[in-house]
């Protein structure tokens, strides 16, 4: 049974998760992300989506905090502005993830995809900005890239919920 055909009240099987992960850029990495987190390992499709969004939101808040710290610490005004721009994108992204959670909670499954997709695009845009801006900040690029991948999984999960 695929995730798209399972009801939201049934626990996802490994086959369901593998099917979902086949829609991402790294099905093995996706499966590992889902199965390694107790909040997403044994849930239905709603629980999976909620867990992914929670995790993405926490990561986004941490990265935003680092961006703010970097912006305050640098004396390079161009770099400071790029960090601030990304921080603002992260602020928007965090808000959009909250909107997605509210839509899920209200049962508006068809409405959860757009805020997650928009968040993914914000983070991807920030990644491009940071690649040119962050000499010596490889760790934030990696965290941003990890969040982008997590959001790609959430997008696949949202797309499946969108079909319910």
Image (cartoon, helix red, strand yellow):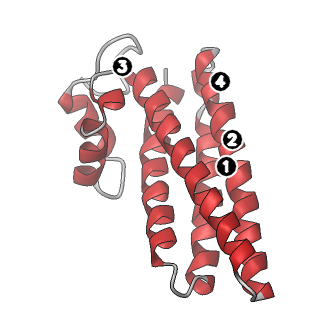
- From the image, tell me which residue sits under label 4: 103
Q: Quadrant of the rendered structure where residue 132 is?
A: bottom right
Query: Is residue 122 among the parts visible in the rendering?
Result: yes
Could you tell which of marks 3 and 4 lies nearer the N-terminus? 3
Distance between the alpha carbons at the discs numbered 3 and 2: 22 Å
Distance between the alpha carbons at the discs numbered 2 and 4: 11 Å
85 shown above or below 32: below
Q: Are marks 1 and 3 in contact (CB under 8 Å)?
A: no
Q: Residue at x 36, y 51 (%)?
A: 24
Q: Residue at x 42, y 22 (%)?
A: 47
Which disc is residue 96 wearing?
2
Q: Kindly state the secondary structure of the residue where label 1 is placed.
A: helix
Which disc is residue 44 wearing?
3
Left or right for 152, reference 14 = right
Which disc is residue 93 wearing?
1
Q: Are marks 3 and 2 in contact (CB under 8 Å)?
A: no
Q: Are marks 1 and 2 in contact (CB under 8 Å)?
A: yes
149 shown above or below 158: below
Q: Position of residue 73 (x, y in %)?
A: 69, 77
Crowding at dot 3, Cα within 10 Å, few <14 / some 14-19 / many 20+, comes out as: many
Tell which of 160 and 54 is nearer to you.
54
Distance between the alpha carbons at the discs numbered 4 and 1: 15 Å
Could you tell which of marks 1 and 3 lies nearer the N-terminus? 3
Q: Kindly state the secondary structure of the residue where label 4 is placed.
A: helix
Distance between the alpha carbons at the discs numbered 3 and 4: 17 Å
Could you tell which of marks 4 and 1 lies nearer the N-terminus? 1
Crowding at dot 2, Cα within 10 Å, few <14 / some 14-19 / many 20+, comes out as: many
- Give the total number of marks visible in the rendering: 4
Nearest to viewer (mark 4 / mark 1): 1
Query: Is residue 159 among the parts visible in the rendering?
Result: no
């Amino acid at each position: 049974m695929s995730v798209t055909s399972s009801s939201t009240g049934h626990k996802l099987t490994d086959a369901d998760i593998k099917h979902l992960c086949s829609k991402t850029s790294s099905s093995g990495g996706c499966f590992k992300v889902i199965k390694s987190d107790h909040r997403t390992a044994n849930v239905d499709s709603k629980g999976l989506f909620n867990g992914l969004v929670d995790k993405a939101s926490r990561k986004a808040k941490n990265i935003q905090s680092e961006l703010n710290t970097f912006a305050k610490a640098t004396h390079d005004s161009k770099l400071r502005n790029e960090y601030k721009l990304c921080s603002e994108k992260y602020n928007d992204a965090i808000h959009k993830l909250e909107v997605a959670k509210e839509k899920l909670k209200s049962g508006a499954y068809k409405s959860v995809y757009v805020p997650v997709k928009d968040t993914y695009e914000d983070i991807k845009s920030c990644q491009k900005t940071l690649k040119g801006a962050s000499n010596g900040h490889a760790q934030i690029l990696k965290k941003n890239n990890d969040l982008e991948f997590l959001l790609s999984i959430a997008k696949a999960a949202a797309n499946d919920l969108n079909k319910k």
